[in-house]
Image: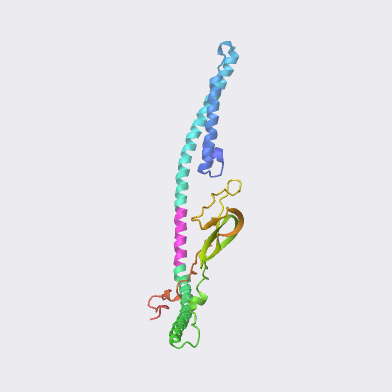
Amino acid sequence: MNFIAKVFGKKTPNSTTIAAEIDRSTKERDDTLQKLQDVHTGLALMSDDDHRVADERAGAMRRTVARLEAGIAELQKAHDDAIIAEAEAERLASLDQLRARAEAARHAVSVESKALLEQYDLLAEKMAAVISRVTEIDVEVAAVNEALRTNRVAEDVPSVTQTWRKAPDQQAGERREKRPCWVHHVRHAEKWDDKWTHHDDEFVSQATLDENGKPIPTAPPVASNVLQSVTVPHIEMREVVVSRTQFRPGRVEAPLSGIHLPTGFAGGTAHWPRS
């Protein structure tokens, strides 16, 4: 019985189990070699009987090491053969898998795709009829609106796209909040027909806040001429614009008339655009 059969019995080992046995046998050999080095320690103090026993143990250890090394060599060859065999098995399995895929693809082309293309032709013809009718409606709407320009008996009719295929526009707007503002007034004096009149202008500017949220003092405005008087700015909570949104037209879907629906089978007629 060879070493492989002795270790694994009737089981067929793979490269992984053989590698594990190589590691185990190598460790056992190294441990035995270490014990062999220690077997004659203290030789000078041994009796003749002790010396004979030590020699017998050393001989047994050498035979064990020889058997293990022969087994390791046999295991190493078996490991190399197993790797080659497993790689070949994997290659053959990959070929079988590819062969099965090719057969499945051939069946899908010859059977499944034919049924799918027949179904496509039916659906495409229905879609073409829908697109054709929608296009006719839009053509009629354009003609009606053109006629209404000279005979305004009704409002323009919105197109199919404007009614159903355009997202709502985003209207321009602004968001307002109450914020602390500096407010001051400028009184103007004017003389008309030897009479003095007065009117006030109010000026509001949003206050800048410090790190504590307190308004930073601002320099008081100065009158531009002797006919003006300016009040000292004071803080008031006023509504100011904090953000604005611009007008954005709604997104329009791609026109249905731009769809291309080819024939399902060679030699057929395209469903859309229609010839």
Residue 181, how many percent across, how many down? 58, 55
Please report the bounds of the magenta region as a residue range: 92-107
The part of the image, by quadrant, that contains residue 269 is bottom left
Residue depicted at 61% across the width and 56% down the height: 236
Taking the image as shown, residue 21 lies to the left or right of residue 106, namely right
Residue found at the very far front of the displayed protein: 194
Visible in this render: residue 37?
yes
Residue 177 location in percent, x, y? Answer: 60, 59
Task: Looking at the picture, tell me which residue is in the foreground, 64 or 125.
Answer: 125
Q: Is residue 114 magenta?
A: no
Prevailing SS of the magenta stretch: helix
Q: Is residue 207 above or below residue 128?
A: above
Q: Nearer the viewer, residue 143 or 24?
A: 143
How many numbered marks does the figure carry? 0
Where does the C terminus fall, quadrant-wise?
A: bottom left
Q: Is residue 197 positioned above or below 226 on the image?
A: below
Please determine whether, in this image, residue 60 is positioned above or below residue 261: above
Going 60% across and 53% down the picture, which residue do you hit? 234
Query: Residue 13: x and y, percent?
Result: 53, 43
Viewer-proximal residue, 162 or 88? 162
Which image quarter: residue 257?
A: bottom left
